[in-house]
Amino acid sequence: MRLLLVEDDQHLGSGLKKGLERAGYSVEWLQDGKDGLHSAQTGGFEIAVLDVNLPGMSGIDVMRRIRGDIKIHSLPTLLLTALDGVDNKVMGLDAGADDYLTKPFDFKELLARLRALIRRQSGRSGELLICGDIELSRTGRIAKKAGEPLLLTARELRLLTLLMEHQGHIINKSEIEEELYGWEEGSDSNTVEVVIYNLRKKLGKDTISTIRGVGYMMRK
């Protein structure tokens, strides 16, 4: 499996490249954000690991450009950063990252998270998910209502995907938080409610049902 690694720290990048290759990945390691974006656009990678603080172009900007490129917008991507805190994590996820890992981290956890991203990607087909007049491409990251494209934030799209993949089933708040924020803790207590509220404004207030004390559900 081809993996793009963009990390400007010489010591960390070298160690990650060696470790990932021992784990079975074919790794291209770059140290500049612009070079990383160009390689992502031309290299045919199956997964990417980006540092946030890169010369040339930040990892956040690289992430946004990837998600805006129709050819590579579904590339599973994990962000690395030395910056801790909820705001930095939210910024990365809102840019379109699939997961987020704060330095320093255990290499075994990185491998586990990469495996999870690969499983998630392989478990999704290119078929549309349909719920009433709402359509969602699982890999295309495109949602429509009555044929018209919906302008959704990255978190709204993540939550809509989760709910539509489990139509008719209740998704509890902790499962939603894990989907929105990965494995790290620290989200505001009302974050899920805010995203649900914003989705209802865009989809229709009756689209998502609240199961009090349990969670949320999209009915089939």
Image: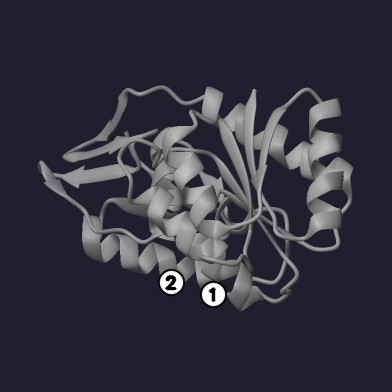
Image position of 177 (left or right of 198): right
Residue located 45% across and 51% down the image: 159
Across and down, in percent, residue 72 comes to: 40, 38
Task: Give the position of the C terminus as an image quadrant.
Answer: top left
Across and down, in percent, residue 30 comes to: 64, 48
- Dot 2: element: helix
Image position of 41 (left or right of 112): left
Give above or below for 182 relative to 198. above
Rendered image: mark on residue 194? 2
Q: Amino acid at mark 1?
A: Asn
How packed mark 1 is, by other alpha carbons closer than 10 Å (few <14, some 14-19, many 20 or more), is: few
Across and down, in percent, residue 87 comes to: 60, 77
The residue tagged 1 is: 190
Residue 16 lies in what quarter of the image? top right
Residue located 56% across and 61% down the image: 59
- Dot 1: element: loop
Image position of 93 (left or right of 17): left
Residue 188 lies in what quarter of the image? bottom right
Residue closer to the observer: 26 or 189: 26
Labels 1 and 2 touching (C-beta < 8 A)? yes
How packed mark 2 is, by other alpha carbons closer than 10 Å (few <14, some 14-19, many 20 or more), is: few
Residue closer to the observer: 50 or 194: 50
Q: Amino acid at mark 2?
A: Val
Q: CA distance from mark 1 to mark 2?
A: 6 Å
Residue located 71% across and 32% down the image: 115
Across and down, in percent, residue 31 comes to: 65, 54
Task: Give the position of the N terminus as an image quadrant.
Answer: top right
- Residue 147 appears in the rendering: yes
- Residue 95 appears in the rendering: no
